[in-house]
Amino acid sequence: MSDGRFDRFVGVGLGIDVHNEQPDWRAILGSDLPVDFFEVYTRGTLAAAHEVAAAAAAAGDLPLLYHDDALDPIRPEGLIAADLEAARVNMAAVAAPWCVSELATRRIGDRYLDFFMPILLTEEAADAAAENMRLIEAALPGRIVAENPPYLLPVGPLHILEVLARVTERAGCDCVLDTGHLYSFQICRGLDPLAGVDAFPLERVVELHVAGAEVEDEGGVALYHDSHGAAEIPPVLLEMLAEIAPRCPNLRAVTIEVEDANLERCARQLEQTREAVAGLLAARPSDRSD
Amino acid sequence: MGLADQMRHTEELMRRPGQLGALVSAGGDDGAVLATIDAGRLAAVAANHARHVVDRWWGRRFSGTTRALDAVARELVASDRFCEAVGEDVTAAAIVHATLDRLDADEELAAARVWLPELLAWEYLLAVGLPRRAASEAIDEAVEARVLEGRGSLLTGGRLARPVGVLSIRWPLGDLQDDPALEVEPLDEPETRVFFMAEAVPGEVAPVLEVGAADQLADAVSLLAAGASDATLGEAFGEDAAEAASFLRAHGLIAG
């Protein structure tokens, strides 16, 4: 299936939540910030995605990706039809070639969780997620792409990269590698930031994420808080990005998740991230502008 | 047993980290998976999680109650009542039931029994009962009945244009909300207060207004909720009826 303008490396874009006041995505569209695409987050609700799509089209036809955190693809009970339908409508509205879904859930049974429970690190969990990803892809107008979730408390014997590899293989889907989420896992296990990357099928990676974060000390235990635009990007994440990005032969997009950031922080994080992948940006075909 | 149970146990452990040993000891596939949890990390994550839930779910709406209970509030996430929460406890089912259960059962909280239920009811009216009714959002009737029992009521319908709360106040609730550790005396005389949402201004969230009221006003609100006419009010309250009706009309609370 063609990914349209994402058939090749597009560049560095911003993940924006249309429900957040910050950053003002309309102001970004009207600015001279070097943004190559938007990844639109909607939390499963309708209408807002249409608004972004219309504004993006009016602002020079900016390419859009879609990110849905309401699909809960790791639930062994299966998917929720209403959420799937919302994702279908939103994704169609933004004409995204793929929809990003983290391997995590906000529900246990019918109960809402106050935290995003990441996939358990077992083969059974990987199988259940793979089955759900197949069903999601069948229902969407484009591809589904699995993202590694953030961790505070890993449960299960496997490494998250082993689980992500199993899900993508069994579902036949590609993935997003979120450097901050990966780093959060490595902190939990006391591993190096890039542990497990060498053995991971990097040809599955179509998108990389970076975002602001803070590491809190709770009684001597380091807890990684994925703060997105509410914090600066830790230097280690930019180092991970610079190391991993050139090794992903099918990389199409690098997304900075900037919800809650002001324009000044967006500009700073764009500069830092573009510097980390400067080689890839420079290698883009000449019809693309930086 | 299997993945669904392992996920359920994981969620429970976030709220009740002390159960890890027992779950692991149970053995089987679930025990083997849960045995991979770092107990020290679990304790830290659970403590962090509890603070986060208290601050985010209840900190703004029930600031006095959560400050008054302090450590107890953080233990609420471990209670069975926590599982009765809808979303981020939007109907206050978890905090109301868990707080009142705990007050009933814990002798160390005996001193708070006289004033904390009133503070809880007041915060419920201001942050949940009235705003949710005004927005036509679901109310948990059992929660509302329990938190207001013997203290007041929340009235709608009849000739009332908007929901109106009535509460009998015996304690300086504003002072207790600001500092629950304050040693305060009860009011000399119980006060009746009525609560209602101000008329909405487009683009703004309407505040809840709280006014001291004569008993007749509270009774008039009850009669209006039952559909009483002006004549009925007059029969009930004589000359005071006109004053009550005038006040309620001035705030847009009487329909028709």
Image: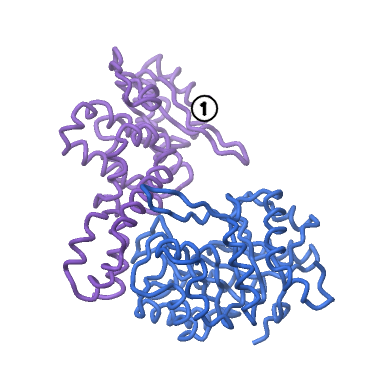
Chain colours: A blue, B purple
Extreme residue toward the top, this view: B188
Q: Is residue A157 left or right of residue B132?
A: left
What amino acid type should be assigned to the residue bearing mark 1?
His
Residue in front for this viewpoint, A77 or A258:
A258
Q: With respect to residue A144, does B233 lie above or below?
A: above
Residue B133 vs residue B221, the one in the foreground? B133
Tell me: residue A210, above or below residue A101: above
Instruction: State the SS at label 1.
Output: loop
Q: On the rendered image, what quadrant is the N terminus of chain B found in?
A: bottom left
Q: Residue placed at 72% from the left, 54% from the top? A: A267
Q: Nearer the viewer, residue A47 or A31?
A: A31
Where residue A17 sits, quadrant-wise, is bottom right
The answer to whether residue B227 shows anywhere in this view is no
Residue A72, picture quadrant: bottom left
- Relative side of B173 to A212, left or right: left
Relative image position of residue B18 (x, y in whole percent): 23, 54
Residue plotted at (57% across, 37% down)? B200
Note whether B205 is above or below A163 in the view shown: above
Residue found 43% across the figure and 77% down from its top: A163
Q: Percent from the top left, x then y, of residue A71?
A: 48, 69
Residue under the point 32% across and 57% down: B42
Kindly tell me whether residue A149 is visible in this rendering. yes
Mark 1 closeness class: few <14, some 14–19, many ≥20 residues within 10 Å? some
Height in image: A289 above or below B123? Answer: below
x and y percent of residue A236 in the render?
57, 60
Give the image location of residue B136, x and y in percent: 46, 47
In which chain is the residue bearing label 1?
B
Instruction: Kindly give the residue lying farthest to the right in the view shown.
Output: A287
Location of mark 1 (residue): B251
User: How many numbered marks does the figure carry?
Assistant: 1
